[in-house]
Image (cartoon, helix red, strand yellow):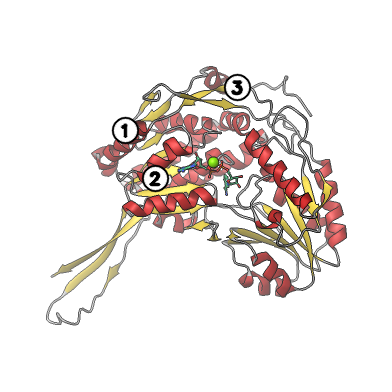
Amino acid sequence: MNNTNNIQLTKRSIEFLARKNHAMLIGGKWCASSNGATLAVHNPADESLLGSVPAATEADVDTAVGAARQAFESVAWGRMRPDQRQRLLLRLADLVEEHAKTLAEIESLDNGKSVVIAEHVDVALVASYFRYMAGWATKIEGSTLDVSIPFAPQNQFVGYTRKEPIGVVGAIVAWNFPLLLAAWKLGPALATGCTVVLKPAEQTPLSALYLGQLIQEAGFPDGVVNVVTGDGPSVGAPLTRHPGVNKLTFTGSTDVGKLIGKAAMDNMTRITLELGGKSPVIVLEDCDPAVAAAGAAQAIYFNQGQVCCAGSRLYVHKKNYERVVADLAAHANALKIGHGLDPATQLGPLVSREQMDRVCSYIDIGRQQGAEVVAGGARAGSLGYFVQPTVLAKVDQKARVVQEEIFGPVVVAMPYDDLDEVAALANDSPFGLGASIWSNDLARVHRLIPKIKSGTVWVNCHNMLDPALPFGGYKQSGFGKEMGRAALDAYLEQKSVLMMV
Ligand code: NAI
Ligand code: MG
């Protein structure tokens, strides 16, 4: 494993991290928790303490929702012209780019991910998403309708619809892409004129706090974005129950998503849920085994496998199964494991000890249920939360490692015979977030795509996301879409207007 002694952080990162005890953002003010409690923040690569953030209380959540409500009703934000909202989002995108290295370093230290990936994937996508959503701020449209009310034939009417911002948004996000997930919520919320209470994950709160500073610098009015730090039960749950919240948007586990869905229904709060996955990588008969193995490695090991749409189930046509699995194991064994700040690192640590233990226990469950470990299979090293990139072969479709989300660098590989069989195997899952098909046989690819029950199907690639392309799950992978025009509608109410003239 490498070390990072010679890596120089940006001046801005050094200054930010030197604060040690960070504050949270409520109503434009940086504050501590109302009872002074804090939560430790760790670097998962070496288990060192990075500092602390406020452990917010239910009272703090209430204050933040109040601040967001006040901002929503204010003239400064509520009556702001759409082109001014667009300008603010564009300015925020510019600031994100200007601070890209710092954001990437903070993300890498807090989450463990590669600083190179953080800069060129996470932060780059955040800036491009804010720009994409900035464009929509001036393009929110209703329709005009010719009505034919049968019982009032003698009258004339003008009918139209208008789209209005939902109001206060409660956004709760996971730790795997802390900044990007926050941006997926903030982009459409701000473009439509909503206000937000954002709760980052307790494992990775720092980049959201840094983004809070940039949001202030961009010139958003106080209270439009509030960042409240703390854990799920004490901060997330009160936010989901709060009657002053008009919409909840969540990225995280399916179990917590179900709790949020139930809490939301008590107040009829609108919801978008982006949840877990067990996405299949389907290698057709014609695919070059070397291409398939490289693709499968990228699909599962990107971000240490902590990706909701990670390609965690590999189905290879039996003709090439042995070859692809052997090549994939070679890819896994060649990955350079290390500290995220080392630019040479290809696989960083998992986010926490809890997640490392969870992933290792799944590997053991796989073994117990008959899987053959052809690469990895254990923790890597003894300091930091590293897990070896792992390939489990010859696994039974009903095994827990095939059916349950592991959320780590572990792929299960299974052979199949024909197209209908692989479609059935791919769909034999409670999840339906993503899938990839690897083939140049256009006819087969097009026959397979409609059969796959998932929100995204990639062909000859995996984990590729674009601001314009809606993303979201079928089945237990979620509810509603993020990105694209579809994401906007989730932050808008539609009002019908009928005028007798
Ligand atoms: P989690 O779903 O508990 O955490 C995600 C967010 O929800 C965090 O901000 C957390 O504080 C918040 N939260 C937790 N309980 C809550 C509650 N009762 N009410 C409101 N908010 C609450 O995920 P966790 O425990 O960190 O990871 C467990 C497993 O979940 C992972 O191993 C993985 O399988 C899955 N997961 C999936 C993700 C995805 O993107 N699909 C992301 C993160 C986790
Ligand atoms: Mg949890």
Evaluate if marks 3 and 1 touch, with contact meaning CB atoms under 8 Å apart.
no
Q: Nearer the viewer, residue 367 or 302?
A: 367
Q: Secondary structure at mark 3?
A: strand
Quarter of the rendering occupied by the N terminus: top right
Evaluate if marks 2 and 3 touch, with contact meaning CB atoms under 8 Å apart.
no
Residue type of the residue flagged with mark 3: Leu
| Residue for point 35% across, 38% down | 224
Q: Position of residue 46 (x, y in %)?
A: 69, 25
Q: Secondary structure at mark 1?
A: helix
Q: Is the C-beta of the residue carrying label 2 under 8 Å from the nearest atom of ligand 1?
A: yes
Q: Nearer the viewer, mark 2 or mark 1?
A: 2
The answer for how far apart the CA atoms under marks 3 and 1 are is 29 Å
Residue type of the residue flagged with mark 1: Thr
| Residue for point 25% across, 75% down | 146
Neighbour tally class for label 1: few under 14, some 14-19, many 20 plus, Cα within 10 Å? some
Residue type of the residue flagged with mark 2: Thr
Q: Which residue is mark 1?
A: 63
Q: Position of residue 435 (x, y in %)?
A: 65, 60
Which disc is residue 240 wearing? 2
- The quarter of the image that holds ligand 2 is top right
Quarter of the rendering occupied by the C terminus: bottom left
Q: Nearer the viewer, residue 156 or 183?
A: 183
Examine the rendered structure and indicate whether residue 441 appears above or below residue 325. below
Which disc is residue 49 wearing? 3
Dividing the picture into quarters, in which one does residue 441 lie? Answer: bottom right
**Side of 12 relative to 463 (left or right):** left
Which comes before the other along the chain, label 3 or label 1?
Answer: 3
Q: Nearer the viewer, residue 331 or 236?
A: 236
Q: Position of residue 22 (x, y in %)?
A: 47, 23
Which comes before the other along the chain, label 2 or label 1?
Answer: 1
Looking at the image, the residue that sits furthest to the front is 368
